[in-house]
């Protein structure tokens, strides 16, 4: 188990970095794949994870060919890619009547196409080696819909359909595919919501607070464990009770 290699897309983001840290503490070698747009952000991440087996790798997860090269590179350098966490995500919130094509395309390509791009290239090796753990970071808003998020809600709901379909395809090969649907957590994405709207959301959370990224990361680690081989095609909500369904 200690030799397992994990890739986390959106790896230096709010949820992604917490997931990297949790997986590394559980003994995985972790590659945090993310855009290299902001060198200061990368440097801050590298300071934060100093001493852990985590390295940053530049990747635009919405670029199909870049993902092919990236997966091949990981397999060549580290021998395998065993755990894939698709956590790359952005928002471009607007009501549909104000949403332009670019806002739709950006959210669908970063949040949903990226899942296809990475899984498409990673499953081959996982199936051949007889082991793989794929965890897709969806959202409560993919379950309930959210005002101003037709793009994001569509992408996040789509991720779970993808999860269930792929789970069936790879189940006999030791590969599990699950999604985690976080609620509102303490991340930059949520901090960017106008204060009055954010407070209104927190007021509706039964637990009475935003989630901690580490609480999402703990769930991901659980699903990524070697012992989690009988959980597949599932969606685990981690939302403080904001949405209770089954
Ligand atoms: N429900 C119903 N009506 C609402 C509403 C809501 N939640 N919010 C606003 N409205 C109403 C307004 O009162 C206003 O009504 P009137 O026209 O009668 O005055 C109207 O809708 C405003 O419509 P607009 O198209 O003009 O909206 P806007 O441009 O002012 O703002 C928005 C739209 C930018 C999407 C804004 O509502 C917003 O930022 N919402 C927050 C969206 C959100 O929660 N995003 C989550 C981001 S975090 C995340 O996604 C992480 C995760 O996975 C959980």
Image: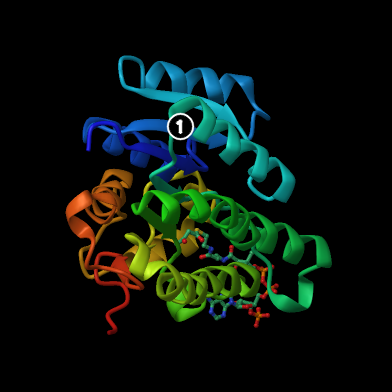
The coloring applied to the image is: rainbow
Q: Is the shortest distance between ligand 1 and the CB of mark 1 under 8 Å?
A: no
Q: Secondary structure at mark 1?
A: strand
Residue that extends furthest to the left in the rendered view of this protein: 227
Specify few, some or many for label 1: CA neighbours under 10 Å numbering under 14, 14-19, or 20 or more: many
Ligand 1 rendered quadrant? bottom right
Question: Taking 67 as reference, is 142 above or below it?
Answer: below
Q: Quadrant of the C terminus?
A: bottom left
Q: Nearer the viewer, residue 193 or 19?
A: 19
**Do we see residue 113 in this rendering?**
yes
Residue that extends furthest to the bottom in the rendered view of this protein: 246
Q: Quadrant of the N terminus?
A: top left
Determine the residue positioned at 65% across, 44% down: 68
Q: Nearer the viewer, residue 132 or 19?
A: 132
Residue 81: image location, x then y, percent: 44, 41
- Give left or right: position of 128 versus 50: right
- Give left or right: position of 178 versus 125: left
Residue 126: image location, x then y, percent: 43, 51
- Give left or right: position of 209 versus 111: left
**Do we see residue 63 in this rendering?**
no
Question: Taking 90 as reference, is 60 above or below it?
Answer: above
Q: Nearer the viewer, residue 2 or 85?
A: 2
Question: Taking 142 as reference, is 106 above or below it?
Answer: above
Determine the residue positioned at 48% across, 76% down: 165
Determine the residue positioned at 60% across, 60% down: 116
User: Looking at the rendering, which quadrant does residue 119 occupy?
Assistant: bottom right
Residue 127: image location, x then y, percent: 43, 56
Residue that extends furthest to the front in the rendered view of this protein: 128
Residue 10: image location, x then y, percent: 52, 42
Mark 1 highlights which residue?
Answer: 31
């Amino acid at each position: 188990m200690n030799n397992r290699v994990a890739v986390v897309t959106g790896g230096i983001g709010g949820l992604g970095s917490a997931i990297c840290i949790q997986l590394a503490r559980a003994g995985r070698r972790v590659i945090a794949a993310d855009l290299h747009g902001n060198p200061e952000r990368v440097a801050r991440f590298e300071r934060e994870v100093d001493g852990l087996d985590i390295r940053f790798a530049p990747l635009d997860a919405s670029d199909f060919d870049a993902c092919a090269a990236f997966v091949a590179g990981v397999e060549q350098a580290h021998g395998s890619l065993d755990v894939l966490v698709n956590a790359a995500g952005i928002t471009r919130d607007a009501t549909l009547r104000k949403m332009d094509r670019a806002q739709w395309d950006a959210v669908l390509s970063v949040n949903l196409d990226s899942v296809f791009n990475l899984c498409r290239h990673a499953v081959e090796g996982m199936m051949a080696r007889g082991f793989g753990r794929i965890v897709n970071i969806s959202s409560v808003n993919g379950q309930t819909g959210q005002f101003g998020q037709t793009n994001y809600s569509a992408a996040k709901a789509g991720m779970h359909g993808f999860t269930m379909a792929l789970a069936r395809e790879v189940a006999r090969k030791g590969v599990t595919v699950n999604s985690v649907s976080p609620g509102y957590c303490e991340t930059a994405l949520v901090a960017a919501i106008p204060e009055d709207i954010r407070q209104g959301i927190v007021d509706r959370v039964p637990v009475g607070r935003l989630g901690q990224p580490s609480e999402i990361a703990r769930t991901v680690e659980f699903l990524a464990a070697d012992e989690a081989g009988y959980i597949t095609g599932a969606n685990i909500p981690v939302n403080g009770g904001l949405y209770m369904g089954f």
